[in-house]
Image: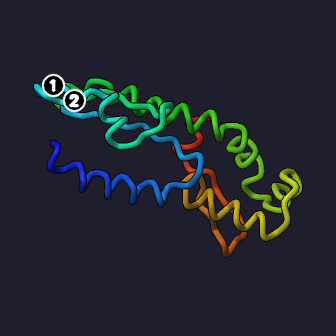
């Protein structure tokens, strides 16, 4: 709805600011079952989305393309992180071994583990100085 575009852009820009580089994004052009709905390419141009942005036409009434959007995100996570997740899984109880494997010092390891915890890939146990790959991530391996 054109009256809501300004609010939508404010929200979109706020989300863009908090996303980490490399975060997979898929945009959904919803309500495609309603007459006058904007085509995904119009959504792209009005929201200043890059040419390579993935935009799917959807309707929540029928669920069209919602599964495709979810599969896209899961596949992007797999492509970007599967090899790292396999290494992480191997060294869950041996952070020092992981540091050697990745050739990282203590500060770099702290930053890496914090980043992966924020992304919800791992759970860190700081008292025991261990981490565990989250169950959902194990399904990607």
Callouts 1 and 2 close, C-beta under 8 Å: yes
Nearest to the observer: residue 41 or residue 17: 41
Residue corresponding to mark 2:
59
| Left-right relation of 118 to 103 | left
Counting from the top left corner in percent of width and height, residue 140 is at 58, 35
Determine which of the numbered discs, if any, sits on residue 33 in the image.
1
- Asked where in the image residue 85 lies, by quadrant, the reply is top right
- Asked where in the image residue 67 lies, by quadrant, the reply is top left
Q: Name the residue at 57% across, 39% down.
A: 77
Image quadrant where one finds the C terminus: top right
Of the residues under marks 1 and 2, which one precedes in the sequence? 1
* Residue that protrudes farthest toward the left in the picture: 35
Q: Name the residue at 44% across, 31% down.
A: 54
Nearest to the observer: residue 54 or residue 106: 54
Counting from the top left corner in percent of width and height, residue 41 is at 34, 28
Q: Marks 1 and 2, how far apart in space?
A: 6 Å
| Element class at badge 2 | loop
Q: Name the residue at 59% across, 60% down.
A: 117
């Amino acid at each position: 709805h054109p009256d809501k575009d300004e609010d939508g852009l404010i929200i979109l820009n706020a989300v863009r600011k908090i996303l980490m580089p490399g975060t997979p994004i898929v945009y959904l052009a919803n309500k495609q079952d309603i007459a006058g709905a904007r085509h995904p390419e119009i959504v792209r141009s009005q929201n200043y989305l890059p040419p390579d942005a993935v935009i799917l036409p959807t309707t929540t009434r029928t669920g069209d393309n919602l599964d495709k959007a979810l599969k896209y995100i899961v596949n992007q996570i797999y492509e970007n992180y599967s090899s790292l997740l396999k290494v992480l899984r191997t060294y869950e109880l041996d952070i020092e071994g992981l540091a050697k494997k990745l050739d990282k010092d203590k500060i770099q390891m702290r930053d890496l583990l914090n980043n992966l915890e924020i992304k919800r890939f791992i759970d860190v146990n700081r008292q025991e100085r261990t981490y565990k790959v989250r169950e959902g991530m194990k399904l990607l391996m």
